[in-house]
Amino acid sequence: MSATRSHHEFDVAIVGGGCAGAVAALSAARAGARVALIERMGYLGGTATSVLDSFYGFFTPGEPPFRVVGGIAQEIERSLVAEGHAFYRENAHGGGIGIGYDPEHLKDLFDDITEREGVQVYLHTELTGARTSAGRVERLSLIARGEPLELSAAGFVDASGDASLVRLAGGPVVNAARGGLKQAMTTTMRLANVDNELARSFPREHLAEYVRQARASGRYEVPHDDIHVRRSSTGGGAHALLTRIGGYDATDVLELSAAERAGRRQAREYLRFLQDQVPGYARAELVSYGVHIGVRDSRRAVGDYELTSDDVLNGRKFPDVIAQSGSPVEIQGSDDADWRYLSDERVYDIPLRSLIVSGFDNLLAAGRCLSADHEAQASARLMAQCMAMGEGAGAAAALSVSLGVSPRTLPLPELQDRLVRAGAILFDDQHVPFDITSAPRSPGEVDRGGGATGAENAV
């Protein structure tokens, strides 16, 4: 005997409560839609609150840096900074200014804003199926703590990261791993009892040399030199990105399970190396691993348009722009990273067509599962761009529902005007230079131009 399914109705339903999905929900709600936000974890934020502690992609990497993401993402940034839970930092790779934040306070902020805007949040809820008809998603099948439920809506956004809704709806997807293009995954750690001042007392190049010497000694399995430990807002605390776990398919549960175990093993080995060999870490202790391994790429939706590496690197402009980015292509391998920068420090557009799922009239995909090739996704997947895409997708879904049209036939000037009036940055004439010297910095951080050091190196 099957369990009785309760049924819930909304205007817009969003699958995935990470940065893209949470912002999409806020954007749709502020446009007047009744919004459901579905998240499998017990909190919102996704990778931002489960794995990492820094936002990237808000600014161009050039001199001076220009802000290219505003709107709801900037509202979140400003709230965290005003409360003393975020600060600005340089990026050692030249990918632009980063924004360090406290993940626990980011969870609180997402709770507060979604509640205030009337978003119905379904935590501990997983997507199990989707009913479609004539090119439209009609209903989602969900399970929440063993209880089945169904949810119907007029518009849908897949912000799952893995294009899970698109796949379950029978839509077209590309699996990066099965195409032979697997970006490495990363297990992160939170550390305590780090002497941050001592750890920052030597140049970053010395840290890489310590790794090379440790590997040459044969005493440590530390396969790559590009490691990063960043001070946290907690005294003696640090956030460590040390691992590269390559060769696994994040959509295969057995391979992902193996990657999780391999990530923790590699992280422990790097911590042993830090404790033994690197000044400032002798008393360092593991507080926690990231809730799950950090996944950079898995499935992507096939949209009306596929954003390409040429579009990114040449700063292409689109008439249906809903977000911008100046971030380089960053492809992380098992042993090293391939960085490719935009020519002449340009900024490229992310078009609405790359969010509209091919063959569907009411389904958008936002965040790292947008329609993009391998290289373009490796730039557009940064959290600032995911939030900007989420804002565009949420606004487009809500406007489509209110007008009774498909997102692909929306009046673009109306959509773009709504986004710009909400603070989103869509056009180059909106760019404003950012002066990090007058912005809040982490305690004791080196001055601009002073160079990154051991405990303050961000990817």
Image (cartoon, grey):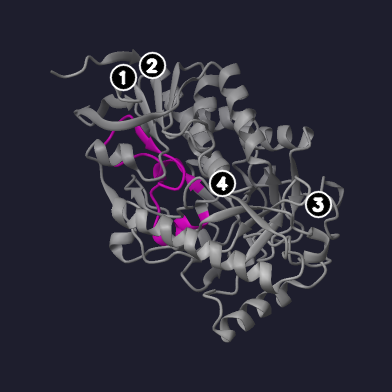
Mark 2: which amino acid?
Answer: Phe
Asked if the stretch drawn in magenta spans residue 361, the answer is: yes
User: Residue 232 vs residue 26: left or right?
Assistant: right
Q: CA distance from mark 2 to mark 3?
A: 42 Å
Residue that carries the numbered disc 4 in the rendered image: 383
Residue that carries the numbered disc 2 in the rendered image: 10
Residue nearest the viewer, comparing 337 with 253:
253
Relative image position of residue 219 (x, y in whole percent): 56, 80
Tag 3 secondary structure: helix
Image marks 2 and 1: residues in contact by CB distance under 8 Å: yes
User: Image point 57% across, 81% down: which residue?
Assistant: 215
Relative image position of residue 223 (x, y in whole percent): 51, 75
Residue range (magenta) = 350-379
Tell me the number on the disc at residue 152. Answer: 1
Q: For the residue carrying disc 2, how many other residues have a C-alpha within 10 Å: few (<14), some (14-19), or many (20+)?
A: some
Q: For the residue carrying disc 1, how many other residues have a C-alpha within 10 Å: few (<14), some (14-19), or many (20+)?
A: many
Mark 4: which amino acid?
Answer: Met
Residue nearest the viewer, comparing 50 with 73:
50
Relative image position of residue 101 (x, y in whole percent): 69, 43
Mark 3: which amino acid?
Answer: Ile
Image marks 2 and 4: residues in contact by CB distance under 8 Å: no
Asked if the stretch drawn in magenta spans residue 325, the answer is: no
Image marks 1 and 3: residues in contact by CB distance under 8 Å: no
Q: In this view of the protein, can residue 368 be seen by the observer?
A: yes
Tag 4 secondary structure: helix
User: Image point 59% across, 74% down: which residue?
Assistant: 225
Residue that carries the numbered disc 3 in the rendered image: 436
Tell me the number on the disc at residue 179. Answer: none
Q: CA distance from mark 2 to mark 1?
A: 6 Å
The answer to which image quadrant residue 78 occupies is top right
Compare marks 4 and 3 and give the one earlier in the sequence. Answer: 4
User: Residue 256 vs residue 108: left or right?
Assistant: left
